[in-house]
Amino acid sequence: MLKRHSVLPGFSITLGFTLTYLSLIVLIPLSATFLKSATLGWDGFWAVVTAPRVLASYKLTFGAALTGATINAVFGLLVAWILVRYDFFGKKLVDALVDLPFALPTAVAGIALATIYSSKGWIGLFFAPLGIKIAHTPLGIVVALTFIGLPFVVRTVQPVLEAFDTELEEAAASLGANRSQTFRKVILPTLLPAILTGFALAFARAVGEYGSVIFIAGNIPMVSEITPLLIVTKLEQYDYAGATALAVSMLVVSFGLLLAINGLQRWTEMRRA
Amino acid sequence: MSIEIKNVEKSFGRFKALKNISLDIAGGELVALLGPSGCGKTTLLRIIAGLEAPDAGSILFHGEDATHRHVRDRQVGFVFQHYALFRHMTVFENVAFGLRVRPRRKRPPESVVRQKVHDLLNLVQLDWLAERYPDQLSGGQRQRIALARALAVEPQVLLLDEPFGALDAKVRKDLRRWLRRLHDELHVTSVFVTHDQEEALEVADRVVVLNEGRIEQIGAPHEVYDHPATPFVYQFLGDVNLFHGRVHDGHARIGETEVELAGGPDHPGSAVFYVRPHEIEILRDRGTGTIAAKISDIRPLGATVRIELERTDGRGLVEVELTRDRFANKGFLHGESVYLQPKRLRTFDHNSTLENTIGSGQFIAS
């Protein structure tokens, strides 16, 4: 690395600290999982991570996480929009409410959601006659993952929207654009990088979520069993190598997806520089 | 297209931004709204554009009531002080925006859009920047792109809100001359807001001076400069020296000095006399109608020299501006005792439009 003169001091110290810190907190624990799973050998590893019950759990975990993050991207944008653009009674309260899913123990959230969305619960009650079961189905998992991911998009979009210059909207209007054109062509492209960041965070959080999901999912093998639950099950059976093998496969897929989202976000930001 | 503004009022909360404004702008005219910050000039411009709605009064475009017409239907081009370019679009797409958002049946085909955008970029002499993004341009270039974008929709009226306010002095000067030439070429009715009197006087056909939500004076640049209607206009359009004194028996009395007010009306009582720095002569001998003073500072400013003097009667500072040549001839020195002879004294009588001029001895009612 070239040493360049800079007015900002301490490059080598801060970089050294960052690398040590990341190694202790992230890299070493993660490589330990890789090492442990390696004890299975390639064939053993492959057999574990491609078992039918495991494959079904991947589909559910990543599918529900993507669905939840997508719902959050749309409605999180709406919540952020309302919090930034309008003044109404109790706005501060609503604003504080957004962060609650962060503060609540996820098990509590899971039990509450399972109770309310069960076919006799306050909300599930209205869906049951329509033949829609929420609790103990994949739909329930999506509800739980949407709940825990809510703050991410709101909190990433909010500051960008606050900084958004209303003159741009006025400029678009004076050039003849209607509201929907202004939103699609002027506002949305500006917010897109922030929305993608929020989406990626909500997705990453949802993939790893355990506590809230196991209470509402019903955990039926092949139907509503998430991968993190399979990992815990293997741990309970003292199958440590099998558990780490699943963890490694999840890590690789998640990393790939996050990398893709980051790339997409980079691309949307590049277009303006 | 002509614009008529009739009895427009606007308040923000308890603050009255505009108080009963009426103004006619003829088709093809270039008008400057001039005033200090907070005088309501930008609010008035935004009301003309339809970005703000007046509390009372009406706006007529070409004789038709446009008060309640939406900004996107008004056919106005609006240029913002901070450009308001779309950062995620290229320069080309920025200029094309107004054409691309038209309703489908009125939208021109791609080839026409291309041609038109390139014509406009040529007009603002920036065709070579078509594929760049706004962040890659300088301030002056961005403002010219913003203007091209506003012109793309073929506006009936062009409105510019402090268009050169964020640019440095040199670019500002170039751009305002360029705007004047562009207007002479296009003849689109234009209104621009500025707090810079030099800019207003140089660019506009007519200047509207605003203060605290009211129109102080409307007139051609030389009219408002030479015959200011109110003390505010006088002070806003240039540097000024104030002399407190009395008018008595057709004489102006300033301190110990008595000056003849030839031909002027006799308004006995105390008065304030206004003199511009370049309208005062510095003499070495007493002469007539002079005020004694001592030179306290000499500052060469390019083509002129600014001299600050302290009145010997202790009634404040006076600023005088001399040309370089004149200063070199006289060779005034710091600390020298001299006599000041005002060449043009103006008084304003309780917001009236009366004006006294000493020397020429005229009495002008404007």
Image (cartoon, coloured by chain):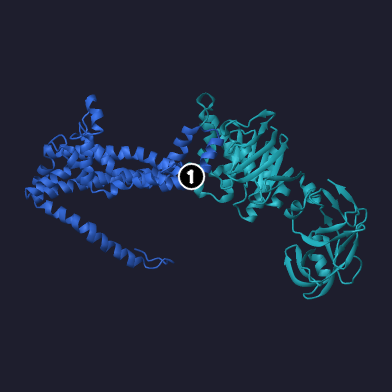
The spot of residue B360 in percent (x, y) is 90, 54
For the N terminus of chain B, the image quarter is top right
Residue at the location (62% across, 51% down)?
B165
Q: Is residue B192 above or below residue B281?
A: above
Residue at the location (19% across, 57% down)?
A29
In the picture, which chain is blue? Answer: A
Secondary structure under badge 1? loop
For the C terminus of chain B, the image quarter is top right
Q: Quadrant of residue A191?
A: top left
Q: Chain of mark 1?
A: B
**For chain B, what colour was chosen?**
cyan
Q: Is residue B156 above or below residue B226?
A: above
Residue placed under numbered mark 1 in the picture: B87
User: On the rendered structure, is B16 left or right of A243?
Assistant: right
User: On the rendered structure, is A254 left or right of A76?
Assistant: left
Q: Is residue A161 above or below residue B28?
A: below
Q: Can residue B344 be seen from the camera position used here? A: no
Between residues B209 and B79, which one lies in front from this camera angle? Answer: B209
Residue at the location (40% across, 65% down)?
A4
Say what amino acid the circle numbered 1 marks: Arg
